[in-house]
């Protein structure tokens, strides 16, 4: 078996042979590579900060369910699906929806899409569901890193588990967060600004999860990083 020291010796030999070329134009690919590295690490770190900030802003689910029991808001026919990175709390979109509309669907699904560190997830381990009071359901759907998540397929599995989630009577709610570089998160301000710019230009969540465009509602929020 070849040791890591052998690979290091080969790499150092290549580096020594090419280090003199840096001043004659070799610095260009180094600058490009450095820029790509900064962008990728900024996105990775910023995504972690954003997930943590959204989780901190979410209301504890048991407290939210207690508020539902106390307020008893009107319940309308259909299913509301709220996509959230962490279904342990009530996502901002759900809290804002209740505050603005003063009503809830008769069935609420808190859906978390998880990416596992394996290429594919077995069908019998795809969906885990937990039935909660007041018509709430907490669902976790796992996909491998080689798979493309499809929310409507997850809801088909939810119907097998006793939920309604009729395609023609289901509305999807997403949080559209605007990230501000003014928080106390452990990242420099210029990198927060870079992440906020990348987040504004990121692809649509609805498109990524193949949600029907005429059944998607986005609720905005301003989050400090």
Image (tube, grey):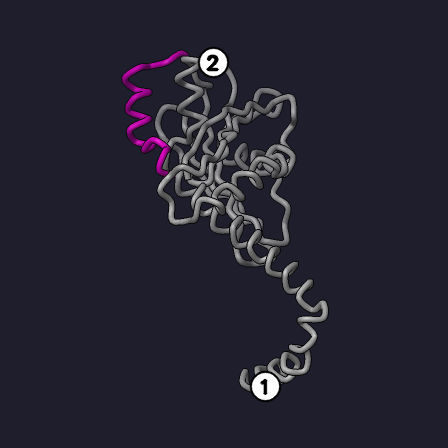
Residue at 51% from the left image edge and 23% from the top image edge: 79
- Secondary structure of residue under mark 2: strand
Task: Tell me where residue 17 sits by quadrant.
Answer: bottom right
Q: How far apart are marks 1 and 2 (CA)?
A: 68 Å
Q: Where is residue 55 in the image (x, y as percent from the top left)?
A: 38, 38
Residue at 52% from the left image edge and 30% from the top image edge: 176
Camera-side residue of 191 and 198: 191
Q: Position of residue 158 (x, y in %)?
A: 52, 35
Q: What stretch is highlighted in magenta?
A: 55-76
Q: Is residue 102 above or below residue 51?
A: above
Residue named by callout 2: 76
Task: Tell me where residue 213 sits by quadrant.
Answer: top right
Q: Is residue 87 visible?
A: no
Q: Does the magenta stretch include residue 116?
A: no
Residue at 62% from the left image edge and 34% from the top image edge: 204
> Which of the image's four quarters has the N terminus?
bottom right
Q: In this view, does 47 lie above or below 109?
A: below
Specify few, some or many for label 1: CA neighbours under 10 Å numbering under 14, 14-19, or 20 or more.
Answer: few
Residue at 52% from the left image edge and 47% from the top image edge: 142
Q: Can residue 114 be seen in this view?
A: yes
Residue named by callout 1: 9
In the image: residue 10, left or right of residue 109? right
> Which of the image's four quarters has the C terminus?
top left
Camera-side residue of 222 and 2: 222
How many numbered discs? 2
């Amino acid at each position: 078996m070849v040791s890591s020291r052998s690979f290091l010796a080969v790499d150092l030999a290549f580096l020594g042979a090419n280090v003199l070329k840096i001043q004659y134009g070799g610095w260009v690919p180094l600058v490009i590579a450095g820029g790509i590295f900064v962008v990728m690490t900024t996105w990775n770190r910023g995504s972690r900060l954003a997930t943590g900030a959204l989780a901190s802003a979410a209301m504890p689910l048991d407290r939210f369910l207690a508020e539902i029991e106390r307020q008893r808001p009107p319940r309308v026919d259909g299913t509301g699906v709220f996509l959230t990175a962490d279904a342990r709390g009530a996502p901002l979109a759900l809290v804002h929806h209740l505050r603005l509309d003063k009503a809830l669907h008769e069935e609420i699904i808190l859906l978390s899409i998880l990416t596992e560190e394996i290429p594919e997830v077995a069908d019998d381990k795809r969906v885990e569901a937990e039935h909660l009071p007041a018509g709430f359901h907490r669902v976790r759907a796992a996909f491998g890193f080689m798979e493309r998540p499809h929310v409507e397929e997850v809801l088909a599995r939810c119907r097998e588990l006793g939920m309604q989630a009729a395609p023609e009577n289901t509305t999807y709610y997403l949080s559209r967060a605007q990230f501000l570089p003014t928080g106390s998160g452990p990242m420099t301000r210029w990198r927060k600004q870079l992440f906020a710019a990348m987040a504004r230009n990121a692809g649509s969540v609805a498109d990524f999860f193949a949600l029907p465009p005429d059944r998607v509602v986005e609720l905005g929020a301003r989050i400090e990083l």
